[in-house]
């Protein structure tokens, strides 16, 4: 009787071990499968979010560049026909450099529409060509900041002249 009791206990223990082994191996494989599916779905979600973010940034960039010479076909056509300009980026850089060259004056850039205050002169820091005729620019003397809207003209000899349309100097107490 002792032998049959030990035999039954041995068989029950063996079956218990077999079922436990099967349970944990199937649980582990299902967790790996679930983890793989989660990673796949999260990578799909992540790539979709990234694509959506890139699309939104691209749309914002296009909106920001609505008023730019580089994206204005009519202004480019006008320049091509009237001045025989065939390279817009080179032309835009030429106009920017012509305007920025006035920063070297001891009184500051005369196209900021501001006189020198104290020892600091007003100089133009950034320029954007809006079309074949207008420029918007930021200027500063290190303490005060402003913006100016300019007209520009390309003369027959290729020189560039500017005319101030409007200028605004922000009050000193604004941050």
Image (cartoon, helix red, strand yellow):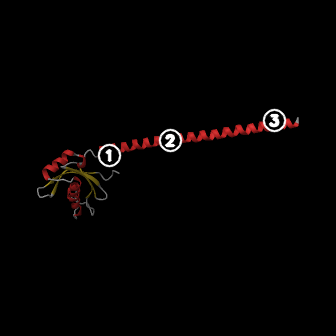
Q: Quadrant of the N terminus?
A: top right
Circle 3 — which element?
helix
Which residue is situated farthest in the right direction here?
1
| In-front residue for pair 104/74 | 74
User: In x, y percent, where is residue 159?
Assistant: 15, 58
Q: Residues within 10 Å of mark 3 (few under 14, many from 20)?
A: few
Q: Which residue is mark 2?
A: 40
Q: Is residue 85 left or right of residue 14?
A: left
Assess disc 2: are there few (<14), some (14-19) or many (≥20) residues with their C-alpha within 10 Å of its C-alpha.
few
Whole-angstrom CA distance, mark 3 to mark 2, is 48 Å
Q: Is residue 119 above or below residue 88?
A: below
Residue at which label 1 appears: 61
User: First in sequence: mark 1 or mark 3?
Assistant: 3
Q: Mark 2 touching mark 1, by CB under 8 A?
A: no
Real-space CA distance between mark 2 and mark 1, rounded to the nearest whole angstrom: 31 Å
Residue, disc 3: 8
Q: What residue do we see at 62% from left, 41% from top?
A: 28
Tag nearer the camera, 3 or 2: 3
In-image side of 16 versus 53 (left or right) = right
Q: Position of residue 124 (x, y in %)?
A: 26, 57
Foreground residue, 47 or 12?
A: 12
Q: Which mark is nearer the camera, 1 or 3?
A: 3
Q: In front of the other: label 2 or label 1?
A: 2
Residue 114's quadrant in the figure?
bottom left
Mark 2: secondary structure: helix
């Amino acid at each position: 009787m002792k032998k049959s009791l030990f035999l039954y206990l041995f068989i029950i223990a063996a079956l218990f071990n077999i079922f436990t082994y099967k349970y944990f191996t199937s649980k582990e494989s299902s967790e790996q499968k679930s983890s793989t599916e989660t990673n796949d779905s999260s990578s799909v979600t992540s790539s979709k979010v990234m694509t959506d973010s890139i699309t939104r940034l691209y749309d914002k960039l296009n909106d920001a560049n609505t008023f730019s010479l580089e994206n204005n076909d009519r202004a480019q056509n006008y320049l091509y026909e009237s001045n025989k300009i065939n390279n817009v980026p080179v032309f835009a850089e030429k106009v920017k450099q012509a305007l920025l060259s006035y920063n070297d004056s001891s009184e500051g850039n005369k196209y900021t529409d501001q006189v020198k205050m104290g020892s600091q002169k007003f100089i133009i820091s950034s320029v954007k060509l809006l079309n074949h005729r207008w420029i918007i620019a930021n200027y500063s003397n290190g303490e005060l900041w402003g913006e100016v809207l300019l007209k520009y003209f390309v003369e027959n000899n290729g020189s560039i002249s500017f005319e101030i349309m409007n200028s605004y100097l922000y009050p000193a107490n604004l941050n």
